[in-house]
Amino acid sequence: MTARNRELVGLIPASLLVTAGFAGVFIQRSNALSNISLTYGAIFLALCLAGHLVIRATLPYADPYMFPLVALLSSFGIVMIYRIDSTFARQQAQWFVLGLILFAVTIIAFRDYRRLERYRYTIAVVSLILLMLPRVPGLGDEVNGAYLSVHLPGVFEFQPTEFAKIGFVIFLASYLRDTRQVLVLGARRILGVTIPPLKHFGPVLVIWGLAMLILFALHDVGSSLMFYGALLAVLYVATSRLSFVVVGVLAFGLGAWYIGAHVPHINARVEEWLHPLNRSLYYAKAGQASSYQLANSLFAQAAGGMFGQGFGQATLTIPGTSNYLLPAPSTDMIYAVITDELGLFGAAAVLIAYLMLIARGFKTAVLARDSFSTLLAVGLSSVLALQVFVIVGGVTRVIPLTGVTLPFISYGGSSIIANLVLLALLLLVSDRARRPA
Amino acid sequence: MNAPITRVFGVVIVLFALLIAWTSRWTVFDAKALRDNPLNARTVIDEEKIDRGEILAAAGTVLAESVKGPDHTWTRRYPTGSLFSQAVGYSIVKTGQAAGLELSDGDYLRGVNTGISAIIGQLGGGTQVGDDVHTTLDPTAQRLALRLLDGRAGSVVALDPRTGAVKVMVSLPTYNDNHPSAPCGAPGCQLNDATQAGDVPGSTFKVLTAVAAIDSGKFTPRSVLNGNSPLTVSGVPLSNDGNQSWGPQTLTTALTNSINTIWAQVAQQLGRSVMTEYMKRFGFYSKPPLDYPPDELAVSRPFSTATGRPFAPGSPNEDIGRIGIGQGGLRVTPLQMAMVAAAVANGGKLMVPHLTSYVVNSDGQTIDTIKPTVYSQVMKSSTAQQVGLMMRKVVEEGTGQPAQLGNISVAGKTGTASIGVTGSDLTEPWFIGFAPAENPQIAIAVTIDQTNGGYGGTVAAPIASSVIKTVLSEHG
């Protein structure tokens, strides 16, 4: 079977899931199966088919598993969002269409993605500007003490980090392809530690500074961790020097510790993380940091147990009101809702689907024939993996909670569009890597 | 560059393993603690969505039912209001308040042991439906007992001595369980005095002393003691009613006429250890084994009048002579005194009292029936028979004559505990007994908390006999 036919077959589980999921919601709501559910399934299947045809026409050798896995995650996401709030699901479907268009545009415009290398400094500057936008007065929004989104009332609202992360990875891959030899060969060894030449290591230090700045200025622990982790992954693959990673982790740790102790918002997040069930933190006054959300995330997961309460069974709102018991159920907290309804097994299945997608990304990196492609695939896969880790880790209290989306599943236009562009880039790399010589 | 890529992927796998480990921590290992955490509103919200089962009286009278509220929630309604409020209690899920059977039978009422159709209903997203609890309570007798108390603070408890089934459980002051937090005119009106009071039993306790005396083999009903008054007990003079000196009398006569000085001597001669042993057999010194919230059950035992603290069982500081006549710091619940009468009535075998009769699930299947259980063999059946005859004499010839019911023979014992300061005429009248004497079907304890000089025979005995008559007539 050719790669593309394998991909086509791979879409069947996604279409079955979305149809069964919508049918489940309808049965739950009205005790009757409405044919709208089947229409939803059909439209989603048609969209996936369209995506598949774009790949078939342009990237015949691309990895056959990535697109079906993304379709599976997205369809699961749209069913979950529909179950939480049907208006959101309609909007999410529209974002998904827009995302697929940008997906196609990316593939067609960057057939030779190595052209991106030429614009690496432009891309770096644009990413930096994007990152800093939420701090611009009148544009930025402070949500729960962090500056995460850009907001022009009535026009648009988006989360620039979602796009900045891609530009950042492109810059890193491109820059380290050029300098990786120099970083290693020009290095001196002092007391057994490899010290790279400052001239070439400078931009890497700049990124460390950037991560610290994100922490300091944007109060965004999650994005900071995501960017910096991707940097370390790409740097390690480029140089094979574990010492760089160790020094990098130590530097980040020191910086994070200092900022954690001195920036009130981050300090509060750490306190909530350490003591989510503390009464006074839980019932903190309005405007103050409160562990209410994290505690209720844990309560929701506990309610799910091993097998979950069943699809559509979780308690979402406080009875008699339309207030969410668990704030932000369709965005930051969607993993907790998934665990509530589908239990440990359902949640683990979702994580394994991500892991399979990430594995295909790293596989692409291994297969790639030039350093830029390898580093790009490593960077994109790492940033995706770290994004999942940051939000799920926050919801499950492995690390302090920050608002990033769960890629492809959470409600949010920026997230779905940016991650589909990320997928397009991975498929582009994959197509070139697997093309018969 | 391949080896580092593999290692980076290895790190990703470790990170994801962490996520799954932490998810299992919350969903499995710490799940129970999280569900029970008082901050967790889900417990209450989920419970509000349960259609709790009904609580019914013996004749099918609905005592508690669920009423639909907004958003698939349910609230409780108590159609009989204050008539059964003490026994039934209340359940307000939103505030987590619960009492009485609503609390102790909560697992049944929530439907923890639901039928198959209920489980399937839940899988399909339906409401969790609880099981109906059928109680042993007799609404006719309950209503009569409440009417006869006539607004006076006091309690009536009636049991079937053969099974331990509680037929009547009334206490005043009471409250309306539809509004348990509303003021109800008297302090402590939410307390179920039938199970929580610390009343002075007075002479009704002589039944227990008589059982100990005869069952231990140290006395017979015909043993003769000197009934002169006053008698110095623990260094303080003790007198009979009206300071009457009776001279030498048998124990039977001493019970018939409630001669304090004789029963104080009996208790002293039996000693603390024998008295304590029999009190324990009757259920003193531990919470009554009723299917009722432990917080709403009081232990019957002697307390030090000096410190207000309970005596250790058999403590040398007890005034055992006065305890033998139901004074000496003794504090009892009306339920405990009904159990004393019931043990004598049932040939010395004390049955575990129970309010729950049987439980029916939403499919109409009876899923649980409370079987009669023996609490203890308090005394030999011959002792029970002898003490029963002595108690018959009390009603036929002695202080309990107002409890007579014509062709139904009643056995009983009156009590008139002095409860005020020395010299005041404040009394707590009592009556405990059973009927029919030759084939007992009901045992009862009646007390009025406080009267001005009222006697057990004149105040409590008529209430007891009316309730006995009603219960017996209902059961043919």
Image (spheres, grey):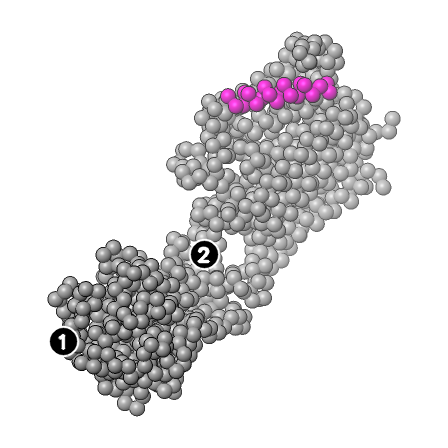
Q: Residue furthest bottom?
A: B407
* Residue appearing at x 76%, y 20% in the figure: A371
* Residue appearing at x 44%, y 39% in the figure: A278
Is residue B270 something that shows in the picture? yes
Is A256 inside the magenta-drawn segment? yes
Residue B175 picture quarter? bottom left
Up-down relation of residue B102 to residue B351 (above or below): above
As helix, strand or loop, the secondary structure at mark 1 comes to: helix
Q: Which mark is on residue B242?
A: 1
- Of the residues under marks 1 and 2, which one precedes in the sequence? 2
* Residue appearing at x 53%, y 70% in the figure: B367
Up-down relation of residue B36 to residue A199 (above or below): below
Q: Nearer the viewer, residue B304 or B99?
A: B304
Q: Which residues are magenta?
A: A239-258
Residue B248 picture quarter? bottom left
As helix, strand or loop, the secondary structure at mark 2 comes to: helix
Is A364 inside the magenta-drawn segment? no
Q: Amino acid at mark 1?
A: Gly
Q: Amino acid at mark 2?
A: Glu
